[in-house]
Image (cartoon, rainbow, N blue to C red):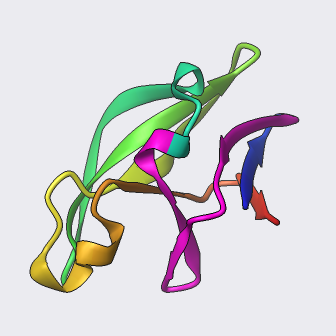
Amino acid sequence: MKAIWNHKIIAESDATVVVENNHYFPHDSIKKEFFNTSESHSTCPWKGEASYYTIEVDGKQNKDAAWYYPEVSDKAQAIKNYVAFWKGIEVKS
């Protein structure tokens, strides 16, 4: 699977985990040069508190377009150290 934004591959892995129709990519498969830590957070009742990354490619930013769970609940152990995407990030095989 590949995550693409602004014509660049920002993550690539053959070991994604699908949860709620989202492909979660192993944290070590993201291209960290495109990821900036965000101050945003949200809470999922069964996964825990999510943190976000703003994606930046060629001077364009996509605020909070990737999320991850620094501390996952017992029910969400499958996505510990994984990152998922939205806000126009294309995920395809």
Check residue 2 for magenta coloring. no
Image position of 35 with respect to 33: above or below: below
Q: Residue furthest top?
A: 59
Residue at left offset 62%, top offset 24%: 56
Residue 79 position by quadrant: bottom left
Whether 43 is drawn above or below 3: the answer is below
Q: Residue at x 25, y 50 (%)?
A: 41
- Residue 51 position, x and y percent, is 29, 48
Determine which quarter of the picture holds residue 1: bottom right
Q: Where is residue 69? Give x, y as percent.
A: 26, 58
| Total numbered circles | 0
Q: In the visual, does 41 lie left or right of 8? A: left
* Residue range (magenta): 7-28
> Is 28 left or right of 89, judged from the image as shown?
left
Q: At 44% from the left edge and 25% from the top edge, which residue is drawn?
A: 36
Residue 47: x percent and y percent?
Answer: 23, 76
Q: Position of residue 43 (x, y in %)?
A: 21, 67
**Residue at (32, 75) in percent of width and height:** 78
Q: Nearer the viewer, residue 81 or 43?
A: 81
Nearer to me, 20 or 27: 27
